[in-house]
Image (tube, helix red, strand yellow):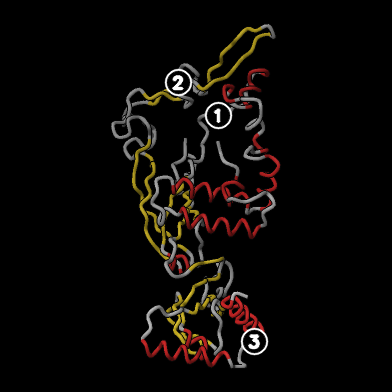
Amino acid sequence: MKRDYYEVLGLGKDASAEDIKKAYRKLARQYHPDVNKAADAEEKFKEVKEAYDVLSDPQKRANYDRFGHQDPNQGFGGGGFDASGMGGFGDIFDMFFGGGRRANPNAPRKGADLQFGLSIEFTEAIFGKETDVEIPKEAECDTCHGTGAKPGSAVETCKTCNGTGQQEVVANTPFGRIVNRRVCTTCEGKGKVVKEKCPSCRGAGRVKVRRKIHLNIPAGVDDGAQLRVPGEGEPGVNGGPAGDLYVVLRVKPHEFFEREGNDIYCEVPITFAQAALGDEIEIPTVDGRVKLKVPAGTQTETYFRLRGKGVPYLRGNGRGDQHVKVRVVTPTKLTERQKELLKEFAGWTEGSTGHTAADESFFEKMKRAFRGD
């Protein structure tokens, strides 16, 4: 049974869109299969992704808040009536009204879609990448060309269902004579019977292959993005078109950078002297190192913006920004001379007028705390 999506993200039903986004990013980093090697990490990652996909979409969230995990568009799908043994709504109609609604089993049908997960590096998601991947899939058998029959042998029309792919089961009930239609057990709904099976595919008409697919990953994609490759899914049935391939991208976390939308965040350490006196420091970016001027008197956890050093916009021109948070690092190993200088500096600051009112208040509170006032 599926868990409540709000419970998965650790949120209440009154959570804002920003709350949902923050919770997802935190949990996605926590359970990302490339970071978390626990046996259940991938399943939890998928669960978090599924919850976010629903709750981040206003329409889907509204439907979920109203109906829960039951899809209101599926009729009896999650309610009190179980139609699984009846073969679906079409069978119910056939039972009471004589049928005739089933599609022709020999009509062309589109093949199933495929999904493939691909891990890429943080910078590859930002700048894009062209790569080849091998996809395990089914393909039409080259020996029998999809018929499932041995070359030279015949494919016959099923005599049980006369090629319809369906069998009629007649039952006399107190309500009258009821005709129920089922998939033909002889031909399994195909309408055709293979007398001599193809030795390559053993009558399936398909074989397992590994197909090399060329992908062009655009710059600016984010974790969970999907690339659609038309016609690279499973082969169609009865001459129908092939399905599509959906490549789901998993972006590996970076050890230094974090991404929020099209902006990049990082934290760099600076010394007390650099913060107090000002300095020009080098900052790593995805484009290489750049210079950043730190003004005198900079406080710890101050943010600076590097415009245009973020992630390219998928649709449109331009890029986001890089936000740099500076943190003043307190030295842990000092020489005697350094200790003397700091003590001298501390004595000077007591009589200095360079502090703000907030600084004075802070120092006064500290003095009272030491005096025990």
Foreground pick, 201 / 255: 255
Give whichever of discs 2 and 3 has the lower sequence position: 2
Q: Residue 43 location, x and y as percent?
A: 46, 45
Location of mark 1 (residue)? 104
Q: What residue type is labelled 3?
A: Thr
Foreground pick, 205 / 152: 205
Q: Between marks 1 and 2, how big is the CA–CA gap? A: 14 Å
* Position of the C terminus by quadrant: bottom right
Mark carried by residue 369: none
Location of mark 3 (residue)? 356
Q: What residue type is labelled 1?
A: Asn
Q: Between marks 2 and 3, how big is the CA–CA gap? A: 93 Å
Q: Residue 6 location, x and y as percent?
A: 62, 47
Where 182 falls versus 55 (above or below)? above
Q: What residue type is labelled 2?
A: Cys
Foreground pick, 355 / 169: 355
